[in-house]
Amino acid sequence: MRQIKWLWSVMDSRFHRKHIVALSISAVTSVMLLINPALTAVLVDEVIVGGNTEPLVRILLMMLGFKLLREGMRYYMIISLEKTSQNTLYNLRTRLFAKLQYQDMTFFDRNRTGDLMTRLSADVDWCRHFLSYIDYVAMDSVVMFLSTSIYLFFVNWRLALTLVMVTPLLTVITKLYSSKVRPLFIDMRDKLAEMNAGAQENIAGNRVVKAFAREEYEKEHFDRRSAAFRDANLDINKLWLSFYPYIEVLANAMTLITVFLGGLFIIQGNLTAGGLSIFTSLSWALSNPMRNLGNLLNDMQRFMTSADKVMQIDLGRPRIVDSPDAKSHDKVLGGLEFQNVTFKFDTTTVLEDISFSVKPGETIAIMGPTGSGKTTLIQLLSRFYDVQKGAILVDGYNVKDWKLQELRGGIGTALQDVFLFSDTVEGNIAFGNQELSVDEVVDFAKRADADAFINQLSNGYDTIIGERGVGLSGGQRQRIALARALAVKPGILIMDDTTSAVDMETEKMIQNELRHLPYSCTKIIIAQRISSVKDADQILILKDGKIAERGTHAELLKQRGYYYETYALQNGLNPASEEVAH
């Protein structure tokens, strides 16, 4: 099966031989189960029936010796399988996490965090379970059934044939059960992902839940998802229980057949008492694989369902990668040009025929109503998505001809929706440039007007920030994010509503610091405040994905469009007035 073949390729080649040896030991120890019943037959025929006590001690010691040897080999087998499975689990999680780091934004747009976490935890653990348990139990069952069947044919082929004839019925039952249970496992896996996704979203959005007093609603919402997962599990168990009696009856039938026909053969002189003891001792070796079969099928179906989900990540390939002809650049200088750029998300046109250029060191501002495509525009610049038409040039080269690491490493981004890691303040600021000295970290914090409040924190720059910056105000988080963007010393600095949560005085201080950076960079400012954009060399107004207005502050006021109306409203003026101060 493809899932097993894939899992084998994931396993470190150093453990391939170890795993094969462990499975071989499983097969050998399954065959060794025949030894003690054979010795028991000798014990019955020669000692008990024959009255010869001489071989008694020797036979008992041999039985004890083989038992200890088998258990020792099984112990080594279990340890080996556990080592190979745990190492494969480690490799797989590391490999999947690395794959996620380089996936496209489209991938994360279409996969919920809760579902991805389920794949990295529960689904991956089922892959480990296959290597540590399912495969050796399957090996045990097959070898045990085949070796026992062959041995019993040598003892008495008529009785053995009668017992083995039960297995075709079991095969039919198993195939029928397997065809019905797989869709149920897929459904159960989906219900688990939905439940985890709901829990993750609720935890991440706990402040919103509390703000709207929706605790009871969220509790009931989670209860419904949890109940759906429970019902999916119950459906599987009900299906299994509907087949289990048939399997159990067939397995017990072997014991009845052994007692009835075995006794009859002894009466007819076609079987010795020792031979019957072999059949009674080993009938479980034929019936036990049947009993295990249902659980084994359940585990196999769960493994295959989980492996399919994990394989989607492991075998998935990002579409946005380095071009084979990608050129290496020392740094991003800041030259920028959009040439008739059009971008669609699925079938929705987000940007259409966007063209503008910016020289290195200049500042361009972008304004427009919500949903006009402002944030999408800067995401295209960093190649989070690729344009369908047109081209984006950085320093005269198409962004598709840049190496992704060099392109993104030369762009510093500070967003309105700030994400800070559970790390120190210093660690967050130096996130994009681990070579920064402490003095440089402090310098960039000062330029973002963050140094003062950082020093007031319990441990200053060594203060651990809570998840997503819990404990800091919106403005404080934004200023740390801006310091982080400045710290990479980018050729292009993107500020997407970066100062929306700070007061006007703080904004002016930050703007003044940005004019005197120790390096040259092109600045892209996305904002709704006129005060944030009025000094830009060029201002673009986006509307419905198109450039509706462009020019300097003074030029746009004369056009009396969206920019003019926004200026008038923010300054308490009447938009209809002929006199608006510039």
Image (cartoon, rainbow, N blue to C red):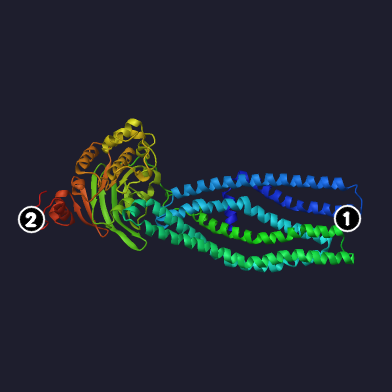
In this rendered view, identify the residue nearer to me: 121 or 496: 121
Which of the two residues, 380 or 479, is positioned nearer the viewer here?
Answer: 479
Amino acid carrying label 2: it is Glu
Give yes or no for contact between labels 2 and 1 (Cβ–Cβ under 8 Å): no
Quarter of the figure with the N terminus? bottom right
Residue 174 visible: no
From the viewer's perspective, tell me whether residue 224 is left or right of residue 543. Answer: right
Q: Is residue 192 visible?
A: yes
The image position of residue 119, as x and y in percent, is: 49, 53
| Residue 161 horizontal/vertical position (percent) | 79, 66
The residues bearing labels 2 and 1 have C-alpha atoms spaced at a distance of 120 Å
Crowding at label 2, few (<14), some or many (≥20) Cα neighbours within 10 Å?
few
Q: In the image, which is nearer the foreground, mark 2 or mark 1?
A: 1
Q: Which residue is mark 2?
A: 578
- 341 vs 79, nearest the viewer: 79
| Image quadrant assignment for residue 368 | bottom left
Secondary structure beneath disc 2? loop
Q: Residue at x 60, y 53 (%)?
A: 130
- Give the number of the disc on residue 45: 1
SS type, badge 1: helix
Determine the image quadrant of residue 352.
Answer: bottom left
Q: Is residue 519 left or right of residue 83?
A: left
Left or right of 415 on screen, residue 284: right
Q: Position of residue 47 (x, y in %)?
A: 89, 52
Amino acid type, mark 1:
Asp
Q: Which mark is residue 332?
A: none
Earlier sequence position, callout 2 versus callout 1: 1
Q: Is residue 325 left or right of residue 279?
A: left
Depth check: give the residue in front, 543 or 359. 543
Q: Position of residue 82 (x, y in %)?
A: 62, 46
